[in-house]
Image (cartoon, helix red, strand yellow):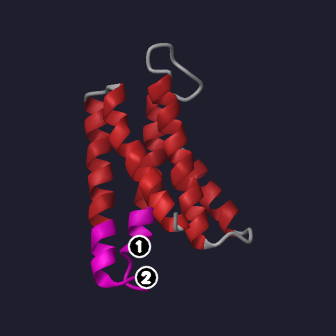
Amino acid sequence: MYNQATAAYQQTTQSTVSPRELEATLLLRAAARLQAVKDDWDTGGSVTLDEALTYNRRLWTILATSVTSEDNPLPLELKQNLGSLGAFILKHTLDVMTNPSPERLTTLIQINRNIAQGLRGT
């Protein structure tokens, strides 16, 4: 799964899409996977909880690592805020894994969608 997230990130980077658009697209893809799990919680669907959480966790690990790197040109306060958000995402993901429920996915879905909207300027 990590290789899939990395490959998707690298493949999309090679196109003419801006980095902000790429990040927004990947966040929306992660949100869609989580939403699919939530929607099909009782019946099971094509995406498992583990797959969706792993994809989201790996995406956020990549994002948090890149945004907090010393060579990232973002202002320090923004880097710190995004790093903290990444840490929250990882902690909440572990919480969902240890105590799964469809309602607990809502936080991850909303954060991904809101950050994607911000990246797209909407």
Identify the residue shown where x is 69% and y is 69%. Answer: 17
Compare residues 113 and 83 and report the one nearer the observer: 113
Tell me if mark 1 has few (under 14), some (14-19) or many (20+) residues whose alpha carbon lies within 10 angstroms of its own.
many
Q: Position of residue 96 (x, y in %)?
A: 30, 34
- Residue furthest out toward the right: 15
Establish if 86 lies above or below 33: below
Q: Which residue is mark 1?
A: 67
At label 1, the amino acid type is Val
Q: Is residue 88 left or right of residue 54?
A: left
Residue 75 on the magenta segment: yes
Seen at 50% across and 59% down, the residue is: 117
Residue 72 bears which disc, if any?
Answer: 2
Quadrant of the rendering where the N terminus is positioned: top right
Q: Is residue 97 above or below residue 88?
A: above
Magenta residue check for 76 = yes
Q: Amino acid at mark 2?
A: Asn
- Do the residues under discs 2 and 1 have CB atoms within 8 angstroms? yes
- Magenta-colored span: 62-82
- Chief secondary structure of the magenta portion: helix
Q: Position of residue 97 (x, y in %)?
A: 32, 33
| Residue 33 at least partly seen | yes
Question: Which numbered dot is residue 42?
Answer: none
**Front position in the image: 77 or 86:** 77
Q: CA distance from mark 2 to mark 1?
A: 6 Å
Above or below: residue 77 compared with residue 33: below
Q: Within the image, what quadrant is residue 86 found in?
A: bottom left
